[in-house]
Amino acid sequence: MWTSAVFCTIGQGTMMDWVLSLVVLSAVALLAGAFVLWRRGNRRQATLMIVLAIVMFANVALWTVPDSTGTALIEQDLVTGSQGSPTR
């Protein structure tokens, strides 16, 4: 299957960068859509879209903002707890 070959050649760090970028772009699109809906009078759906965008931004911040040790969660190996991306 071609997708497994693509994932192997791209690597985990690059794939996570793509995912985080898409999450941020989606959150921005949600905010833009919420603005349009708010102006049209659909306040409840616009509010829910704003809340979802805030949750998405918070998730990206959790992955990318460094903690007190200076290491971001995206830089840690979640299996062993060590720094650096896992090699596969």
Image (cartoon, rainbow, N blue to C red):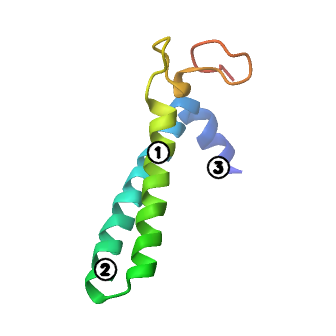
Question: The C terminus appears in which quarter of the rendering?
Answer: top right
Q: Residue at x 59, y 42 (%)?
A: 6
The picture quadrant where one finds residue 65 is top left
- 47 and 25: which one is in front? 47
Q: Is residue 40 above or below residue 57?
A: below
Q: Residue at x 59, y 20 (%)?
A: 76
**Amino acid type of the residue that numbered disc 3 sits on in the rendered structure:** Thr
**Amino acid type of the residue that numbered disc 2 sits on in the rendered structure:** Trp
For marks 1 and 3 on the same chain, the one whose residue lies earlier in the sequence:
3
Q: Secondary structure at mark 2?
A: helix
Position in image of residue 86 (x %, y %): 65, 20
Between the residue at mark 1 and the residue at mark 3, the CA separation in whole angstroms equals: 29 Å
| Label 1 sits on residue | 58
Q: Residue at x 42, y 72 (%)?
A: 47
Q: Is residue 2 above or below residue 85?
A: below
Q: Which mark is residue 28?
A: none
| Label 3 sits on residue | 3
Marks 3,2: beta carbons within 8 A: no
Q: Is residue 58 above or below residue 13?
A: below
Position in image of residue 43 (x %, y %): 38, 81
| Label 2 sits on residue | 38
For the residues carrying marks 3 and 2, which lies nearer the camera in this image? 2
